[in-house]
Image: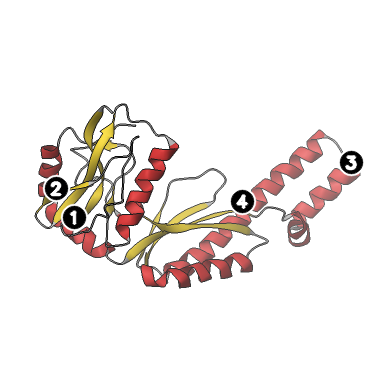
Amino acid sequence: MTTAGPYVYGIVAVDHPVPARLRGVGRPAVPLELLPVGATAAVVSAAPVPLRARRRDLLAHQEVLLALALDGPVLPMRFGMLAPDAEAVRGQLEAGHERNVRALERLAGRVEMNVKVLPATGALAALVAEEPRIRELREAARDHPGYEANLRLGEAVAHTLARRAADVAQRIVPELAALAAARAPGPQVAEAVSNMSFLVDRRDVPDFRAAVDRVSSRYRDRAELRLAGPLPCYSFVEPEGALAAAARTGA
């Protein structure tokens, strides 16, 4: 296998265990190693050439980070981060040493939980019952069927569903944030009116899940909630991390 690298998964404490069974991206999958600098280390492996965003490699990257996070905090890198050589990685670890130590301390014992809020599906009955404007347009489309009437009804339904879901998001985000150490908005996602990540103590994950279930049931006629996690703490690591200058996206 032709390789390049190192391929960088993330930053951990220098004494962070790396399970021998863990393998990185590429086929055949390659073992991991630590590049230590002071109290921190980068978790790296050799990378295949060319590196592509194949599903198996995306999953391998994610599984490495999740497995590492079981034994302590990890500053995760996005998939596809390559460095020109080991010395470049060590140089960046040294330059960002204090910042990385503080970030690892902040993330210790914590995970990322992501909650997306989408308009409710199958909520037409609730819309008709609770929204006079939708009721009027539905009656008009029934009494005088045609393209324009159906178009007006469809646009009004879509707009109202989104408004109702956004109202739910405004209500529940503070409620969920009370169970978290921090929150961070995520990128815009198709159909979602809110994409928010929460930094949650690992021991509090069951309570956080239960809270999401409660609000999901409470507002089921207005919004659909999608919960993902525990996840690596991507949303709570500085965008320009300690390896940004040394690494490049290879995918």
Q: Which residue is denoted by mark 3 in the rendering?
A: 144
The residue at the point 82 percent across, 49 percent down is 138
Horizontal side, residue 140 vs residue 118: left or right: right
Q: Reading the chain from its start, which is encountered first: label 3 or label 2?
A: 2
| First of labels 1, 2 by sequence position | 2
The x, y position of residue 94, in whole percent, is: 10, 48
**Tags 1 and 2 touching, CB below 8 Å:** yes
The answer to which of marks 2 and 4 sits earlier in the sequence is 2
* Amino acid identity at mark 4: Ala
Question: Residue flagged by tag 3: what amino acid is it?
Answer: His
Residue 101, percent from left and from top: 17, 59
Q: Quadrant of residue 39?
A: bottom left
What is the number of the mark on residue 162? Answer: 4
Local crowd at mark 2 within 10 Å, few (<14), some, or many (≥20)?
Answer: many
Q: CA distance from mark 1 to mark 4?
A: 40 Å
Q: Dot 2 corresponds to which residue? A: 93
Residue 194 visible here: yes
